[in-house]
Amino acid sequence: MKQLILFSTLLIIIGCSPTNTSQESEKKLTNQIVLIFNTPVQNGFYEIPGGGGRTQKRNANGDEIQFLDDNMIEQLLHLNIGAESDTVIVKSKRDLVEIRLMYKGVDELKYLFQNGDSVVFNYSGIKPIARILNRQEDYTVTNFSLVERDSIALDEYTAMHITEMPALLYYRARDMEKEEYMSFIKNIDIKSLKNIPTEIEREYTILEALKAEEKISNEQFQYRLQNIYFQLLYLQASPLNKKGEENSKFTSLKAATQDLENRFPDIRTKRGDSLLYNSAYASFFHNSTSIEFSSKVSQYEYKTETAGGRITNYPQAYDSVQVSSQLTAIEKKKLQFAYIKKLFQDAGYFPIEKRWEYLNKFKNDYQDSAMVDFLVKKFNIKFKIDDDLELVDKAGKVTSLEALITSHKGKVLYIDYWASWCGPCINEMPSSKQLQKDLASENIVYIYLSSDRTDRPWQKTMERLELNEGLHFRIDNAGYTTKMEELNIPSIPRYMIYDTKGKLVNNNAPRPSQSKVLKAELMKYIETSK
């Protein structure tokens, strides 16, 4: 891996265990941070004002608080959206902990709190405004991420955020003619790149003023500079630049990075393991290294009857990291943990035995029970292989796919394989509701099988989408049954039709939005049963 020139002042700040030695200092370390939210507002799911119904979603189920625990595991904590008040405890032995709140669906606000802090959040509209109760800290210091967006950004998102995700602004062009639309899309990048130096200069001005007035600690000052620096490096390490080709975009980003390095020379130094506790660095590190290691391994090709594609061969990438001589042991573990997570996230593309093999390999390589236990819980990992789908309904009653099909013989079944995290699946739901209304008098049963690994996101999404019609089940063993492989479902959404005799007659049926062709297909089996 190419040598990384990074910013390590936070080696002392975010990654270290408590270093105070006096009894008085030790008493202040409660190994937790208390977050109090008054009438919390949903930010993991966001409907853009004036966006014509366009939404942005990272998490619509209330898991909106993010932090890296002391085992270097990314944790999502639940926020009781709409409650009068909700208190969340963040457990950590570190002196300083970065806590992030989801914002506007795809954004995140970053806070740096001390061990033992109690913090209250009050909302102004959707904006969470933090105030530390046990010590005094300037509003701008505590809420710097919000200040960035409200007072520094030249658009509704920061220029670096728009540069990373130009699609954030595509909704503005929804009513444009094709030529005007293409011109608008092209100019998003140009404008955001032009705005980056201006916005960064505004950040410098505010930070330096706070430092001159002694309102900001050196740790907070360096932390905010670090976020700027690593965002710039992250964008330069983007997969869009994986061939190392120079273009105006990356020339502009490199110029902004060079200006920051000239202004704050101490920002250039070697990387260190403790920097992995900072999300800006962690994103840059994972992005740059994943590009490198992915280029060293083959791509795993998959194919269904109607589609196909390629994804990184995660087992090979895991092995490639293992033999690297340019990574520390902690860096290796972080990267290999990420590849194991991807292996289970994309479970449909890899055999069950292969997933088990690499989970056991990770367990043996590191003896890290916290990370292994996290994976087992997160992915509902089962160490057995079933022949059929195990289905759990909303009340917790268990059945199987075979039993479900048998119980509805005499009716045509339209089965929808989906999940709460699947955007294309969610987009089909309005059409699915309409389909049921249009064919309400026909002998059809609509069955929805979710591959969510736990109940809460599945049930919360059904509530939000008002999915009250049809039969709903969660597949409790989606990644651990030969039935999924037999049905050939590497990805979702997927739709299937069973005839009145319980025979699978179409294992890749039209989507609900393909209304005309789907209705004809369904009616074909209705007619043959008469």
Image (cartoon, rainbow, N blue to C red):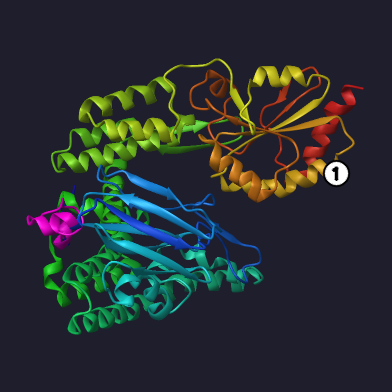
Kindly tell me whether residue 270 is visible in this rendering.
no
Which corner quadrant of the image does residue 247 belong to? Answer: bottom left
Q: In this view of the protein, which residue sits in the foreground, 51 or 15?
A: 15
Q: Residue at x 53, y 56 (%)?
A: 81
Vertical side of 158 occupied by 397: above or below:
above
**Image spot of residue 334 (x, y percent):** 26, 42
Is residue 18 rendered to the left or right of residue 235?
left
For numbered disc 1, what is the local secondary structure?
Answer: helix
Q: Does the stretch in magenta take in 5? A: no
Please give the name of the residue rendered at 55% of the width and 66% of the height, measured from the top-left corner.
170
Q: Residue at x 80, y 41 (%)?
A: 436
Residue at image mark 1 = 438
Which residue sits at x=47%, y=59%?
Answer: 106
Residue range of the region highlighted in magenta in the rendering: 8-27
Q: Is residue 386 above or below residue 4?
A: above
Of the 4 image quadrants, the one containing the C terminus is top right
Within 10 Å of disc 1 (Cα), the crowding (few <14, some 14-19, many 20+) is few
**Majority secondary structure of magenta residues:** loop
- Residue 394 appears at what percent x and percent y? 64, 34
Relative depth, front residue between 148 and 434: 148
Is 139 on the left or on the right of 324, as rendered?
Answer: right
Residue 435 falls left or right of residue 361? right
Furthest toward the right, the residue is 530
Residue 359, image x, y percentages: 33, 27
Q: Position of residue 325 (x, y in %)?
A: 13, 39
Q: Could you tell me if residue 309 is visible in this image?
A: yes
Q: Is residue 211 left or right of residue 157?
A: left
Give the camera-side residue of 157 and 86: 86
**Residue at the farthest left position:** 21
Q: Is residue 18 magenta?
A: yes
Three-letter code, disc 1: Asp
Location of residue 55 by image quarter:
bottom right
